[in-house]
Image (tube, rainbow, N blue to C red):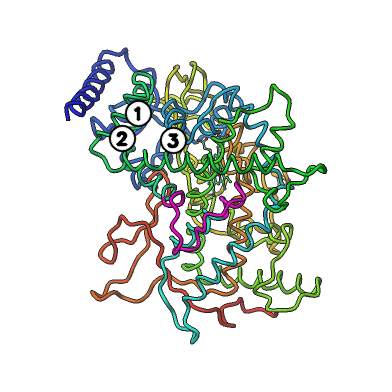
Amino acid sequence: MAFLRVSATSICVFILWRLIRRLRAPKSPLTHIRGPKKEHWLKGNFHRIFQDGRQYNLDMVEQYGGAVKIYALLGQEQLYISDPLALHHIVVKEQNVYEETDMFIMGNRLIFGDGLIATLGEQHRKQRKMLNPVFSLANMRNLLPVIQPIADQLRTILTAELPADGSVVEVNILPWLSRGALEYVCQAALGHSFNALDPTKENDYMDAIRTLAPSSLRLIFLRPFIPMIVRRFSLYWRNKMMDSAPSDALRNIRHVVNVMDTSSKNIFAEKKAALENDDSAGNTVNTMKGKDIMSIMLRANASSSDNDRLTDSELLGQINTIIFAGFETTTSAICRIFWILAEKQDVQARLRSEIRKAKQEYAIAQGLSGPWEDVEVPYDTLMGLPYLDAIVRETLRVYPPTSLLSRTARQSSILPLHEPIRSASGEMISAVHVPENTTLIISILAANHNKRIWGEDAEEWRAERWLSASGERRPFGDDGNSMSGASLGIKDGMKYPGVYATMMTFLGGGRACIGFKFAEMEMKQVLTTLVPRIHFALPKSPDEDGHVKEIYWKMNGLQVPVVRPPAGDNVTAQVPLDLRRVREDDFMNQPR
Ligand code: HEM
């Protein structure tokens, strides 16, 4: 208890010291940038931005433009950026200046070890050099057969819940899609099954990783203290603090870290042993397992030069990093698509028809027998379906699973703007001076809703914007003729530096999402597997009090679907949908 009192007092002294320092600091260098008023002495505007803040974020950018001054915890002034040229500078041109924050890097290192999301500068660049080819298109092609049986298993589980007479049953699809997403990424990344789709099998690793994001969200207010705690307290004292902290979330994170560490060390040892068992032709003894990301990475590392080679601790750090980074984000995106399909029945019918046509044509071309619904189309066909592609792109544009990221200016710099903003004194300015140590928020959400780029209906979900009048995929970015308006995502030479269809959902530059091709493939595979057999609709049946469930998506760090009161508690993550077997009238009204 005495130790607890000392820790609590240290944190209070630290807050007081930061407040006094702020009061005594010279006038803010960001006073010329406009933004919303500080709403709370401790939380600034952060609670409005990060807690269910979707509309607040969009309104703020509409009012103040692509560079806004906001107030963070303890009233710290930060820049909120969505201008395309400024974002190009941040993530591409001056990536070495605008780096991840210490809080992000140190927090991730404590949890995941030395992986991509816990390293900076040269070390990060070296890790990317090793890992980029691992996520190549050719490797993704090889991974499709790994994830197909998992999607099939998911379909079998869900269809088993549907009454044979075609009536509707309400199913919360979130836990199943989340278990599926964990299994895809574990099998693809590690060639290791955690039996995530079998609830009868207990699994510490799966339970641990699924509780990590909720626990870290509950501790969001502690994050700013991580760099101070890591710098000032040894591992011994940090563990003591964790042990005596009166917080279940903190203790859970400690448990999660222990479980992840033990599991990943075992898997890593297995993989290394398998690599050493390679036959003389260089093929691993179990060829299917050899296609997983970890095996490819170990082989690439073994054959790289001494300068480029990663240490065992860096390789180990990638395991939990890839699984964590690729699991919650994709679950959120897939759930969002099913929610949209449930809401927009015409979109669902058109998608189902497109999938049927593709599967039937492929079955005929290959001479396959059996139900068309069970046909697996190859990678290029899957990725080339225009309407499916438009649905995935439009969902990731309008509802990016990760909406806001942070960066710190490691030195002072000038950030140019594509569109000038009005300064606090009224004149238009086209560059912002960013002092050293300023924290910047990258608004993926606002960038993806830029009306200059996407049009006046940017906030609307409209898959057709990605298609030509004849239903073909429209070119985007520099692929087409932007002057004729044929190309999407580029206007008067202005475009975002995103790796995916010029939008910012997966970021751009040297820290862009390394797994975006995998995420895209996974989403498309799940949709083409489930939609032919299952019909989705929003819940309609009232509960015993006569209330119908209304799903509402909160933007808290990640997107969290909840059920609004009175039918729900507004907190528990869930996506309850009405499911039934597909009927002939569930297809678009057109000849087959
Ligand atoms: C819809 C799904 C996904 C979304 C929206 C998404 C989004 C992002 C974003 C915005 C970043 C940049 C984070 C930052 O700079 O702070 C990122 C990084 C990363 N993502 Fe994804 N991601 C998704 C799926 C995946 C998948 C499936 C994997 C792995 C199989 C993955 C692995 C990673 C890794 C390792 C990084 C760190 C890259 C680095 O720092 O160099 N992501 N992701």
User: Which residue is disc 2 drawn over?
Assistant: 221
Q: Is the N terminus in the top left, top right, bottom left or bottom right quadrant?
A: top left
Q: Is residue 30 magenta?
A: no
Which of the numbered marks, if any, corresponds to residue 224?
1
87 relative to 514, above or below: above
289 or 368: nearer the viewer? 289
Q: Is 363 left, or right, of 451 in this rendering? A: right
Q: Which amino acid does label 2 sit on?
A: Phe
Q: Is residue 311 above or below residue 395?
A: above
Residue stretch rendered in magenta on the structure: 184-207
Q: Distance between the residues labelled 3 and 2?
A: 17 Å
Q: Which residue is drawn at 65% across and 57% down?
A: 146
For the residues labelled 1 and 2, the Cα–Cα distance comes to: 7 Å
Q: Which residue is identified by label 3?
A: 111
Could one spot residue 37 in this view of the protein? no
**Labelled pair 1, 2 in contact (Cβ < 8 Å):** yes
